[in-house]
Image (cartoon, rainbow, N blue to C red):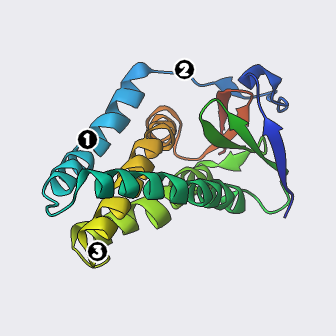
Amino acid sequence: MNIQWCGFLNHPDDLEKANVEGFEKMKDEESDIIFGLILLAIPLFFGVMHMMSIKGMTLTELLVGDIIGLLILIPIFILHELIHALCCPRHAQKQIYWHKLTLITYCKEPMDKTQMMIVLLAPNVLLGCSSYMLWMLGIVSANPLLDKVLGLMILVLLLGAVWDLSLAVTIMIRTPSKAVVCLSGEHIYYKDGK
């Protein structure tokens, strides 16, 4: 399975570089990040509105709900990164780092565009979107405190999806349909896989 915990990452330049001979460096566009934010703005808006509608809680219960939700997020973030790693090619070396305020999964193995999209989006669909739908439909909220805890967790997960979503949008828009994509350091490289 080759998943390795690597500890703290000081700077993305410290990541091991891939052999990108024959690949082109993808241009980073701020518009892709903005597009990712716009895509998530609607569910975030409705989620915040739903949380504001929760009644019957004291200030202490609100704070306890926030603390519980944030503590539960730690193993969920680890699971999120493990899902990224499990979606990478089986034989590839996958590394998980703590960088600034988040965890990142790094795999320098070239993969086709479809597999890279799965790597980027799978944890967000499995953990974020599915939880969001269950929460918004009221299926998983039995009481106001549970509703608050779940809401905070889900909204933080959705906010964390911005980076994955913006990378997916960038790859989808800026690479050929049969592209092979590769991470090297903090940059994305691609080549036409025809």
Badge nearest the viewer, 3 or 1: 3
Q: Secondary structure at mark 2?
A: loop
Q: Residue at x 20, y 45 (%)?
A: 45
Q: Which mark is residue 41?
A: 1
Upstream in sequence: badge 2 or badge 1 = 2
Q: Tell me the quadrant of the picture where the N terminus can be found.
A: bottom right
Q: Which of marks 1 and 3 precedes in the sequence? A: 1
**As rendered, which of 175 and 82 lies closer to the eye?**
82
Disc 1 on helix, strand or loop?
A: helix
Query: Distance of mark 2 from mark 1, alpha carbons?
Result: 24 Å
Q: Is residue 21 left or right of residue 47?
A: right
Q: Are marks 2 and 3 in contact (CB under 8 Å)?
A: no
Q: Secondary structure at mark 3?
A: loop
Please provide percent x and percent y for residue 105: 69, 45
Residue at x 21% of width, y 73% of height: 137
Placement of the C terminus among the 4 image quadrants = top right
Q: On the picture, is 39 further left or further right than 75? A: left
Q: How far apart, in angstroms, are the residues tagged by discs 2 and 3?
A: 43 Å
Residue hosting label 2: 27
Q: Nearer the viewer, mark 2 or mark 3?
A: 3
Judging by the rendered image, the residue that carries numbered circle 3 is 141
The answer to whether 26 is drawn above or below residue 47 in the figure is above
Residue at 45% across, 36% down = 166
In this picture, residue 156 sits left or right of residue 17: left
Going by the numbered disc 3, the residue's amino acid type is: Ser
The amino acid at mark 1 is: Ala
The kind of residue tagged 2 is Lys
Label 3 and label 1: CA atoms lie apart by: 22 Å
Q: Position of residue 193 (x, y in %)?
A: 66, 44
Question: Looking at the image, is 168 positioned above or below residue 9?
Answer: below
Badge 2 crowding class, 10 Å Cα cut-off, few under 14, some 14 to 19, many 20 or more, is few
Q: Earlier in the sequence, mark 2 or mark 3?
A: 2
